[in-house]
Image (cartoon, helix red, strand yellow):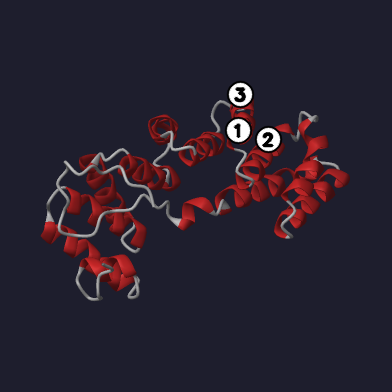
Amino acid sequence: MFSFITNRERTPALPRPSLRIPRMLLLGCWSMLAAAQAVTGVASALPAATLDLWQLSYEKEYAGDAGGALRLLEPMLKEADTRELALLRTGWLLYSRQQYTASASHYLDALRLNALSLEARLGIMLNLMAQKRWSEAMRYGQQVLAQSDNYIAQSRMLVCEEALRDWGALRQRAQKLVSRYPSDPDAWIYLARAHAWLGHEKDSQRAYRQVLRLVPGNQEARVALNLVQKTP
């Protein structure tokens, strides 16, 4: 857990928000699914041998061999008709190995090939977040949102705004998300945290109660609402 709080700042009565990145934003399922769907869409145009390498790459990744998965992609990085997809997938695999600079470089190459690519921008954003380069990450998120009201970009912007302690912006974005995705507990948690830091205790508690309706065992909400013993 990171903390950007100093002793001179007012601490709200509710627990301090953490800068934990929600699990759903780190699993990378969106990247793998998008790549798989893209391959399905162009399967008839790709040689069978290329599709076999692609499939084997996924099998290697699922088996925990990201290095082996990367090696299988090398031939596809050299072919014009597979280069973009291979760059995106290579970017994801390098990110999963915490090679953030190399990963971002591959996503940037993919963006150069396809200036409209939201996936490439999201990949760059993810790597910048991993390096705690929050303002830079937000610039890529804003580029995505300028083209599409993308849920992943919105969710990652919450993480960045919390890290930058921009509580007003965090509250506004979280409120928008809970209106559009009312069953998303992560959005409600960020809304509760923003209200807590802004001193809106009742609003924060209301949001935490909604979290418990969605996830009854959520520890953060239970502590905030005094339903469990706080850790000394």
Q: Are marks 1 and 3 in contact (CB under 8 Å)?
A: no
How far apart marks 1 and 2 lie (CA) works out to 6 Å
Question: Which quadrant of the structure image shows residue 187?
Answer: bottom left
Q: Earlier in the sequence, mark 3 or mark 2?
A: 2
Describe residue 157's horizontal placement relative to residue 114 as left or right: left
Nearer to the camera, 35 or 16: 16
Nearer to the camera, 178 or 227: 227
- State whether residue 111 appears in this view: yes
The numbered mark at residue 112 is 3
x%, y% of residue 186?
36, 58
Which residue corresponds to the image point at 39% horizontal and 34% vertical from the top-left? 138
Q: Amino acid at mark 1?
A: Tyr
Circle 1 is placed at which residue position? 107
How far apart marks 1 and 3 lie (CA) works out to 9 Å
Question: Which quadrant of the structure image shows residue 5?
Answer: top left
Which residue corresponds to the image point at 32% horizontal and 75% vertical from the top-left? 216
Question: Which quadrant of the structure image shows residue 15?
Answer: bottom left
User: Is label 1 or label 3 in front?
Assistant: 1
Q: Amino acid at mark 3?
A: Arg
Circle 2 is placed at which residue position? 87
x%, y% of residue 231?
28, 68
Q: Are marks 1 and 2 in contact (CB under 8 Å)?
A: yes
- State whether residue 184 appears in this view: no
Label 3 crowding class (10 Å Cα cut-off): few <14, some 14-19, many 20+? Answer: few
Q: Earlier in the sequence, mark 1 or mark 2?
A: 2
x%, y% of residue 205?
17, 64
Q: Amino acid at mark 2?
A: Leu
Q: Secondary structure at mark 3?
A: helix
The vertical placement of 167 against 185, above or below, is above
Describe residue 123's horizontal placement relative to residue 4 as left or right: right
